[in-house]
């Protein structure tokens, strides 16, 4: 059976204090079958990344956003990552492109929506990221920034950009004429896959 959580506040005082991350807000016996599906709510831990791989499932169209005050809330995702952990795989939604690129369980990032960046997104050093624009647009308005060193993406790792849709309409758009798509010390690859 599947338990569906559509909302509410879930707090566990000693969450994630044990060696294996226990105790957990949701403790289920599952084999990547999504025994707990989370569609809404606020939690005092990232239930999408509990110790046991993928017992709790948040749809890839949604994400758990860290509110910065030891709480996470379900919000619409801007991108998802194909993640693998303990032999299981799933598509995990992320609230920001930077969080998706920093995923420790996967490197294939697929855009779900058009986004306008308020700050530079960074590919972490040593990280290989494949960014599928999926027909979406990533835009950045340099005129709104304090310096001209702003770029849409700062690459400190290895970044491959592609658009796997039939129309390949995805794009990265920077609206300052003196700037480029991105900057950094990493390797860029533009693919037409």
Image (spheres, helix red, strand yellow):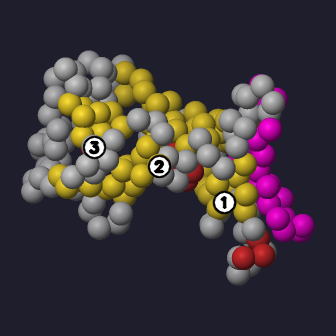
In this rendering, the answer to whether 88 lies above or below 124 is above
Residue occupying image coordinates x 36% and y 37%: 58
Does residue 59 show up? yes
Residue occupying image coordinates x 37% and y 28%: 85
Nearest to the observer: residue 54 or residue 168: 168
Residue range highlighted in magenta: 169-193
Indicate which disc residue 6 carries: 3
Q: Secondary structure at mark 2?
A: strand
Image coords of residue 131 (percent x, y): 66, 39
Mark 1 or mark 3, which is nearer the start of the sequence?
Answer: 3
- Which of the two marks, 2 or 1, is nearer to us in this view? 2
Instruction: Specify the farthest residue to the front.
Output: 6
Image coords of residue 142 (percent x, y): 76, 71
Image coords of residue 92 (percent x, y): 44, 36
Residue occupying image coordinates x 71% and y 76%: 145
Instruction: Look at the numbered discs 2 and 1 and tell me whether their residues touch, using CB distance below 8 Å.
Output: no
Measure the alpha-carbon separation of dots 3 and 1.
29 Å
Residue occupying image coordinates x 31% and y 47%: 40
- Which of the two marks, 2 or 3, is nearer to us in this view? 3
Residue matched to label 1: 116
Q: Secondary structure at mark 1?
A: strand
Residue matched to label 2: 76
Mark 3 or mark 2, which is nearer the start of the sequence?
Answer: 3
Q: Is residue 56 left or right of residue 118?
A: left
For mark 3, does the 10 Å Cα neighbourhood hold few (<14), some (14 to 19), or many (20 or more) residues?
A: few
Q: Does the magenta-highlighted stretch encompass residue 148?
A: no
In this rendering, the answer to whether 56 lies above or below 18 is above
Q: Is residue 134 left or right of residue 65?
A: right
Instruction: Look at the numbered discs 2 and 3 and tell me whether their residues touch, using CB distance below 8 Å.
Output: no
């Amino acid at each position: 059976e599947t338990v569906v959580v559509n909302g509410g506040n879930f707090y566990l005082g000693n969450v994630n204090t044990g060696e294996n991350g226990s105790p957990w807000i949701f403790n289920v016996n599952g084999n990547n079958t999504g025994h707990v599906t989370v569609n809404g709510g606020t939690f005092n831990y990232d239930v999408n990344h509990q110790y046991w791989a993928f017992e709790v499932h948040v749809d890839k169209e949604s994400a758990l956003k860290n509110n910065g005050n030891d709480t996470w809330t379900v919000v619409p995702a801007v991108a998802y990552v194909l993640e693998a952990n303990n032999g299981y795989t799933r598509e995990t939604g992320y609230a920001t492109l930077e969080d998706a690129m920093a995923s420790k369980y996967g490197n294939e990032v697929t855009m779900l929506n058009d986004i306008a960046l308020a700050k530079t997104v960074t590919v972490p050093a040593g990280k290989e990221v494949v960014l599928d624009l999926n027909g979406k647009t990533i835009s950045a308005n340099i005129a709104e920034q304090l310096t001209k060193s702003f770029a849409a993406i700062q690459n400190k790792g290895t970044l491959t950009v592609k658009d796997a849709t039939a129309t390949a309409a995805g794009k990265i758009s920077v609206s300052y004429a003196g700037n480029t798509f991105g900057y950094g010390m990493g390797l860029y690859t533009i693919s037409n896959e």
